[in-house]
Image: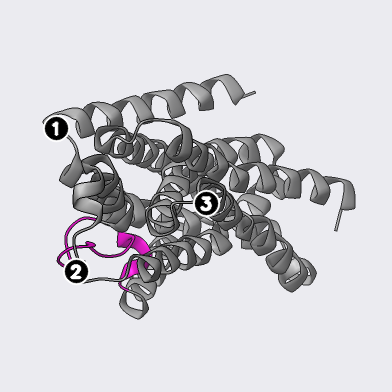
Amino acid sequence: MDLSLAWQALLLTFLAGMSTAVGSLAVVVVPRSRSLLAQGMAFSAGAMIAVSFVELLGQAIDDVGTWSATGALLLGSLFTFGLDLLSPQLHRLGLDLESGHGRGPAVAALEAEAAGPAVATRPRAVNTTRVAVVATLAVALHNFPEGFAVFAGAYQSLQLGAVLTIAIAAHNIPEGMAVAAPVLHATNDRAKAFWAGTGSGLFEPLGAVFGALLLAPVLTPSLVAVMLAFVAGVMVYVSLDELLPAAREQAQEHEVALSLIVGIALMLATLAVLSP
């Protein structure tokens, strides 16, 4: 393994993971907004869908062929679906603080805080601390395989690693919000909320290190190509099953579609700029 390239790939993975700090900071310093969270989710979905089909799947098809790339894409989607079955709150980001369904904990927490003390003192059917823990663990677990995805892409090509870093970072910003908001609501401690959201992003470089140590002896160009198609399947599934439905529940009419298109357009522009 090229140690110099590996360190550069690990740095990109760390940057992608630490973008959760941006979302966490937004929760503790910016007035809470359902619309902002929804637009962030839709934007990141657009960025992830664009990079999945235009860059990841396209490169995998070039390297290993259409059938192998398509199979890996399907496996990535099925893998993520399996995680959903094992932990229903992993990609839906939890449950409604009041009813146990519908909105995710981040949005429910934002609503309760925005409503003021009168709402905050009402009895709740669900323990807000439990919701905060569930959201934190869900996002951390989600970030672990993403970390190795960025590492594998960057190890093959720093240009591809930069594209993946941007796409995953856009996705991690609303995830940081999704962790920090329920922690803030449960503890009323802005420092704890910020560090909880930021810390969940550390699982990405941890995932990169674990994956690199595990697969380093067998990491071939063909295997990396298959992994990129697998990651595309994961990101497309997350975008369609988690981000867009959650955004639609919180946004006003047309906000999600416009944010989605902006995300796609900016990612395509990024790809054009970074292309040789």
- In this rendering, the label closer to the viewer, 3 or 1: 3
Q: Residue at x 59, y 40 (%)?
A: 165
User: Relative to the observer, which residue lies in front, 154 or 60?
Assistant: 154
- Residue 96 x, y percent position in the rendering: 22, 62
> Which residue, given by chain and number where applicable, does mark 2 sit on?
100
Task: Provide the secondary structure element on which disc 1 rests.
Answer: loop
* Three-letter residue code for mark 3: Gly
- Give the CA distance from mark 2 to mark 1: 23 Å
Q: Residue at x 37, y 53 (%)?
A: 185
Q: Which residues are magenta?
A: 88-103
Whether residue 38 appears in magenta in the rendering, the answer is no
User: Relative to the observer, which residue lies in front, 92 or 122?
Assistant: 122
**Lateral position of residue 132 relative to residue 22, left or right:** left
> Which residue, given by chain and number where applicable, does mark 1 sit on?
252
Residue 207 figure quarter: bottom right
* Three-letter residue code for mark 1: Gln
Above or below, 276 against 144 in this view is: above
Task: Provide the secondary structure element on which disc 3 rests.
Answer: helix
Looking at the image, tell me whether mark 3 or mark 1 is earlier in sequence order.
Answer: 3
Q: Residue at x 74, y 50 (%)?
A: 10
In the rendered image, which quarter contains the C terminus? top right
> Which residue, given by chain and number where applicable, does mark 3 sit on?
197
Above or below, 229 against 210 in this view is: above
- Residue 241 x, y percent position in the rendering: 27, 57
Looking at the image, tell me whether mark 2 or mark 3 is earlier in sequence order.
Answer: 2
User: Relative to the observer, which residue lies in front, 131 or 266?
Assistant: 131
